[in-house]
Each structure stands twice: as C-alpha cells, then as structure tokens.
Amino acid sequence: MSFVFGMHIMEGFLPMKWAALWSIAALPFIIAGCRQIAGVVREEPKLLALLAFAGAFVFVLSSLKMPSVTGSCSHPTGVGLGAILFGPGAMVILGMIVLLFQALLLAHGGITTLGANVFSMAIVGPFVAYGVYRLMSKLGAPQGLSVFSGAALGSLITYLVTAAQLALAHPAEVGGFYASLVKFAAIFGVTQIPISIAEGLLTVMVMNLLMAYSRDEIESLSLLRNGGSIHVNN
C-alpha cells in the first residue's frame, strides 16, 4: 500500500475514466511546455546543460521514497528549482520525462496514471512554485526566502492535489469525496510538511551554488535583476 499512498499514483489505481480525464487535462500544458523548451534551446543552446541539471534534480529527489508512520511514503518533488529558473512550462516537460522513466525503470507510478501524476507534480507543483516565488519577489522578500517559499509550497501543494485526485476516484462510502480527501491529506501530511521544508532549504542551497558557478548561464536567462535578485522572463 505504500505505493498507493505515495505521491506517484500507482499503475491501475485510478479508474480508466479518471486516468483519461487527467491525461486530457495535462495535454494543453504539455503542448505549451514543448514550445517553451524549444524556444529556450533555440535562443540559448548553451542552456541545455542547465536544463538537464534541473531535470536530474527532479529525478533524484522524486525517487527518494521516505516511509511514513502511517504506512504511506512521501518524497520531495524537486520541481521548484527548474520552475524558478526556466518557468513552469519547461518543468511540465521535464517532469513528464522524469515520471515516465520512473514508471518504466523504477515501477514508481504507472503508465495509465501518468497523466494524473504529471498534472499534480509536473503542472500544479511548478506553477505554484513559480507563482509563489514571483509574488514574494514582487513584495520585496529576500531572494532566499522567495526561493524557499516557492519550492516548499510547490512540493506541499503537489501532495494536496494528489490527495484530491485519489479522493475523487475513491470517495468514501460515508462522507464521500470530502471524507476521502481528509484521509488522504492526513496520510501525506505526517511526512510531507517536514519534507517540503527540507526541499525548500535544499533548493535555496542549490540556487546559491548555481549563482556562484553558473552565473553566465543564469544571466542569459535574464534572471538577474536589481542587485542579484532572480526574476524570470518568459
């Protein structure tokens, strides 16, 4: 059951109508993400290495399954870093590739549930991370706090969306969707809140390293503005 209650919804756990619905919902974001990545690569080919690093960061962090006292498992998502660097559209594609490889190579997630997992981790997570980061930056928050808030909340909201997806597909006999949502959210919450905080801190550390050693690449993304704070231009 740990795979059922992990962030990646396991193969066969969603009824086909829900699997198809989430795949259809993810499709427009996938198309837009392909265009965004193509634009980045066309304009700045040297950013391929940084793009690959963002994808590897997602793969490694989201492969770290951590047992919970509830019998579930949780893990970081890693999508906040790439969303802040490249924008959320690029992370849709990177996240989808990571989820596909994990389903095929690690039995982590599934093919029929790929659309649902993409929607929660590769769409909602990056858009929340990016939106929170930009909002904090516009409010004048320090760069580190903005990065931390975006990465941590993006990770946490991913799990809440997964809980909602599971609750929609498997409503409780008593209480329906809302009762199931509370159950799944509680299962995830035990470990995911501290994991999200840790992921936020790690993302700040990695961002600082990138700014120290890959400043030219970051500047080519037009990320550095106003004395070193990061702003993303799409």
Image: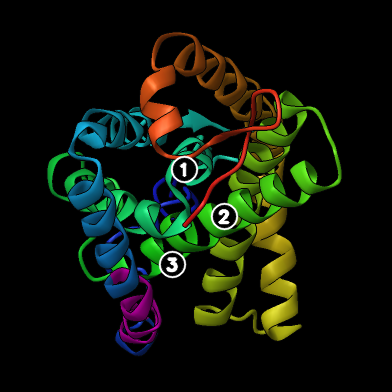
The residue type indicated by label 3 comes to: Phe
Which residue, given by chain and number where applicable, does mark 3 sit on? 119
Q: Are marks 3 and 2 in contact (CB under 8 Å)?
A: no
Question: What element does badge 2 sit on?
Answer: helix
Q: Quadrant of residue 160?
A: bottom right
Q: Nearer the viewer, residue 200 or 134?
A: 134
Q: Residue furthest bottom?
A: 17
- Image position, residue 52 (x, y; %): 24, 33
Q: Residue furthest front?
A: 226
Identity of the residue drawn at 42% across and 45% down? 86
- Distance Cα–Cα, label 1 vs label 2: 10 Å
Identity of the residue drawn at 45% across and 17% down? 210
Query: Would you say residue 20 sits in the magenta stretch?
Result: yes
Question: Which disc, if any, is residue 158?
Answer: 2
Question: What element does badge 3 sit on?
Answer: helix
Identity of the residue drawn at 49% across and 46% down? 83
Question: Which disc, if any, is residue 36?
Answer: none
Q: Residue furthest left?
A: 104
Any part of residue 194 in sight: yes
Q: Quadrant of residue 19?
A: bottom left
Question: For the residues carrying marks 3 and 1, which lies nearer the camera in this image?
Answer: 1
Query: Would you say residue 189 sits in the magenta stretch?
Result: no
Q: Are marks 1 and 2 in contact (CB under 8 Å)?
A: yes
